[in-house]
Image (cartoon, rainbow, N blue to C red):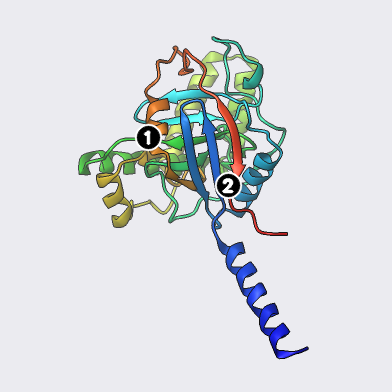
Amino acid sequence: MKKGAFLILVFSLTVFAAKAQLRPQVEIQTSHGSIIIELHHETPLHRDNFLKLVQENVYDSLLFHRVIENFMVQAGDIKSKEAVIGDPLGSADLPYQIPAEIHPELFHQKGALGAARTNNPARASSSTQFYLVQGKVQNDSLLTHNEGRINSFLQRHFAVNNPNNKSLLDSIELARESKDSLLQAELASRWESRIKTQDFDSYTIPEHHRKIYQEIGGTPHLDQNYTVFGQTISGMEVIDAIAAVATDSRDRPKENVYILKMTWLNPPNP
């Protein structure tokens, strides 16, 4: 191979590798304006699933179906496209879950993109539903309180997954199925006591996370319990505007807020 051609090949491979390492950026065009998010390489399962859904136009015309000011805005219910005002939403997605990818350096600062999920022992994420964090600025007292909430969630998580607790959990399920309220109450009390004795490594909010929560805000009580897989890099004012809309008793906006279209802005060249 001639030297010039070799140099061109090396340059092309270098450019391709550099572009492949860029964090994917997705534009979410909404009825309230445009939001641009950047996806994290540290959560490849969530990253790739989200990009696949974007390319398949799954999110286009869906609603923001759950909106709580100073907390987050949520979308991705695949049945919301046909929903009429007042319909209950939030339970529909595609028939699979994504394994949790909870990373110690990815946290719920303002603008974070997180994966919604049901209450399941593996903390597996919904295939389609996601939320964007609005949150609020935290002081030391709030951070200490939220650190306690994080550890309460973690202790319960490890208790649920402790094999020594399986027989008790099975008994609770049988009592629920038989609708034996007295037995349910007794077993629930035993379960709460069991949770409190569960050993686990307690979590401390890192100092650099605390600083961001104190300066920018977020929802720290979700840390280490839900997968964060992206971050808003433009359009935070749009999230604020969506979060401020009037909602019903189910936190659904009284006037529909749409995802008009999602676009992957920087796909690698073929």
Residue at 72% x, 83% y is 5
Q: Nearer the viewer, mark 1 or mark 2?
A: 1
Q: Nearer the viewer, residue 255 or 118?
A: 255
Q: Quadrant of residue 67?
A: top left
Quick one: quadrant of the N terminus? bottom right
Q: Nearer the viewer, residue 243 or 171?
A: 243
From the viewer's perspective, tell me whether residue 37 is left or right of residue 16: left
Residue 245, given in percent of the width and then of the height, sits at 40, 19
Q: Earlier in the sequence, mark 1 or mark 2?
A: 2
Q: Residue furthest front?
A: 4
From the viewer's perspective, tell me whether residue 137 is left or right of residue 115: left
| Residue 229 visible in the picture | no
Residue at 22% x, 41% y is 139
Helix or strand or loop: what does disc 1 sit on?
Answer: helix
The label number, if any, that marks residue 100 in the structure image: 2
Residue 183, given in percent of the width and then of the height, sits at 54, 19
Q: Specify the amino acid type for callout 2.
A: Ala
- Relative vertical location of residue 27 with respect to residue 254 in this rendering, above or below: below
Q: Specify the amino acid type for callout 1.
A: Glu
Helix or strand or loop: what does disc 2 sit on?
Answer: loop
Q: Nearer the viewer, residue 209 or 264?
A: 264
Disc 1 crowd rating (10 Å Cα; few below 14, some 14-19, many 20+) is some
Calculate the distance from the C-alpha at mark 1 to the C-alpha at mark 2.
29 Å
Q: Which residue is mark 1?
A: 237
From the viewer's perspective, tell me whether residue 243 is left or right of residue 159: left
Residue 22, given in percent of the width and then of the height, sits at 55, 60
From the viewer's perspective, tell me whether residue 193 is left or right of residue 49: left
| Residue 264 visible in the picture | yes
- Relative vertical location of residue 78 with respect to residue 255 in this rendering, above or below: below
Residue 188, given in percent of the width and then of the height, sits at 49, 26
- Relative vertical location of residue 15 with respect to residue 207 in this rendering, above or below: below
Disc 2 crowd rating (10 Å Cα; few below 14, some 14-19, many 20+) is many
